[in-house]
Amino acid sequence: MLAGMTREPEQQTGAGEPDGYQRLWTPHRMAYIQGEGKPTGPGAGDGCPFCAIPGLGDEEGLVVARGEHVYAVLNLYPYNSGHLLTVPYRHVADYTDLTGPETAELAEFTKRAMRAIRASAGPQGFNIGLNQGDVAGAGIAAHLHQHVVPRWGGDANFMPVVGQTKVLPQLLADSRAAIAAAWPA
């Protein structure tokens, strides 16, 4: 039980052996685990969500800001509240294939993202990175995207380690609105 909770755990029936544990069900994660929305091939027309998002409205697509060559969007499966991605519009898989203007704007958007997240949420640090290829952990390897993950002291508590569950204190729509409002002009 979580600190401060006094209710006795309910017995589960029909779902395995009763063990007294409380469950935090996260069925929305199954889409990610099963690869829903991943591109089916190497081309931009093969179901790439990063190619589809720019055609959506900002709120529907969770877009925080749009530039000439890249855009910033909240991660649909965040590690922390405010976790966003800077993404080139062009369907390109490798960082070395970016043009000079794309590289410059990707770097600028990363800086702007950090400033906006600092202004809206006050993190104490960031993890920033590109995962190149499936073996490097890229969830969507066919379309380059850079992660900007805000971090706070103690944000990696027992839940991900013991419970294999991430507790996020803010809804995606609320994170998008706060970061977009703080995005530097």
Image (cartoon, grey):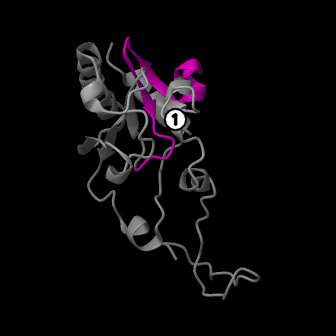
**Vertical relation: 91 (above or below) 135:** above
Callout 1: few (<14), some (14-19), or many (20+) C-alpha neighbours within 10 Å? some
Quick check: 61 left or right of 168?
right
Nearer to the camera, 125 or 39: 39
Q: Which residue is mark 1?
A: 174
Q: Quadrant of residue 29?
A: bottom right
Q: What amino acid does circle 1 point to?
A: Asp
Residue 114 location in percent, x, y? 28, 31
Q: Position of residue 110 (x, y in %)?
A: 28, 28
**Was residue 67 drawn as part of the magenta stretch in this picture?**
yes
Q: Position of residue 81 (x, y in %)?
A: 42, 44
Q: Nearer the viewer, residue 114 or 120?
A: 114
Which one is in front, 107 or 78? Answer: 107
What residue do we see at 25% from left, 43% from top? 126
Q: Quadrant of the C terminus?
A: top left
Q: Is residue 113 magenta?
A: no
Q: Which residues are magenta?
A: 54-79
> In the rendered view, does 135 fall on the left or right side of 37?
left
Q: Which residue lies at the image location 29% right of the left edge and 50% below the top edge?
A: 152
